[in-house]
Image (spheres, helix red, strand yellow):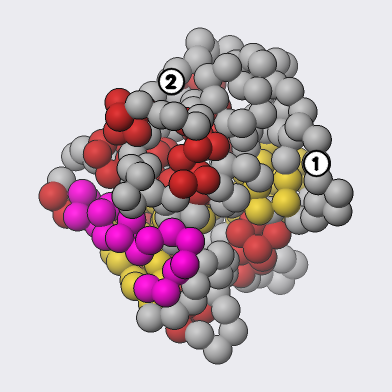
Amino acid sequence: MERVPLWPGAVPGTGFQAQPLPAGFPDILIRNVARPEIRVFPPPAGVPSNGLSLLLLPGGAYSWVSILNEGIEVAARFGAMGYTTFVLVYRLPGEGWEQRADVSLADARRAVQVIRLDAARRQLRPDGIMAVGFSAGGHLAASLATGYGDRVFPAVDVLDDSDARPAAVAAIYPVISLSPDLGHHDSTANLLGANPTAEQIARHSPALHVTADTPPMFLAHALDDPAVKPENTLVMMRAMTAAQRPVEVHMFEKGGHAFGAGRANQPNKAWPDLFHAWAQTQLS
């Protein structure tokens, strides 16, 4: 597996402090990210590339990166369809960063730029880069869709000023609103701190920032999700339709939370195929 750092030298932003891990902390969850990177998964041997790429944004309530079920396993599912996938290991807001609310989005923007820069060498379409996020990673994907043009740190090289817009975005059981009545408490607290202002909440609630330039969006959620209210997905759907942007929504009766690439013997197992069919209509 190839691992590509996002920045050649120092990352933008300061203040990182490694946090002690609880005893027995599972290695399928990543914390203490000082050097964000993308992990590259080309299609397996014998599967021709379709020229399209996915930037995968695992969830973890902005407290960890759930690298297995929302990264590696999803990469395997889409690799079998011919996609080249890039799993983003992004910085976590609560690990000392002075601009805590901005570091994850800065990493997502940079990841799109790095993938696009290298697209020709990998025989990928530079206009075929899509982002897929899960839970808090779904919030990050939606924030990328609405904030791909927001550079909050000084540029470290010319790449920082290049195009960071994904061609399309999928947000799977996403956190969208950070408001106390609808948002996911832990994700909000980890991203913004214990007592965020109304202005901070509004700034980081992506449904409030959909414009005519927001990329097409695919949304999926389970109605029995006990962690992130399905209304989050509906809020994003309404924002997209109000802005007359392309959006497709799938609400599954069952599936709970963190179903990743889909659970066996449940209809949510179909969402990658549904996304693939939808993506063809957006990128043709």
| Residue at (52, 45) in percent of width and height | 186
> Circle 2 is placed at which residue position?
151
16 is higher (above) or lower (below) than 164: above
Would residue 194 be visible to someone looking at this image? yes
Secondary element at image label 2: loop
Earlier residue among tags 2 and 1: 1
Residue 239 drawn in magenta: yes
The residue nearer to you, when weighing 99 against 55, is: 99
Secondary element at image label 1: loop
When asked about the image quadrant of residue 208, the answer is top left
Specify the label residue 266 is tagged with.
none
The span picked out in magenta is 223-240
Dot 1, how many residues are within 10 Å of its Cα: few (below 14), some (14-19), or many (20+)? few
| Residue 281 % position (x, y) | 31, 63
| Residue at (46, 40) in percent of width and height | 188
* Most distant residue in the right direction: 23
Cα–Cα gap, marks 2 and 1: 31 Å
The type of residue carrying mark 1 is Leu
| Residue 167 % position (x, y) | 38, 46
126 is higher (above) or lower (below) than 274: above
Residue 85 drawn in magenta: no
The residue nearer to you, when weighing 114 against 247, is: 247
The residue nearer to you, when weighing 160 against 63, is: 63
> Circle 1 is placed at which residue position?
21
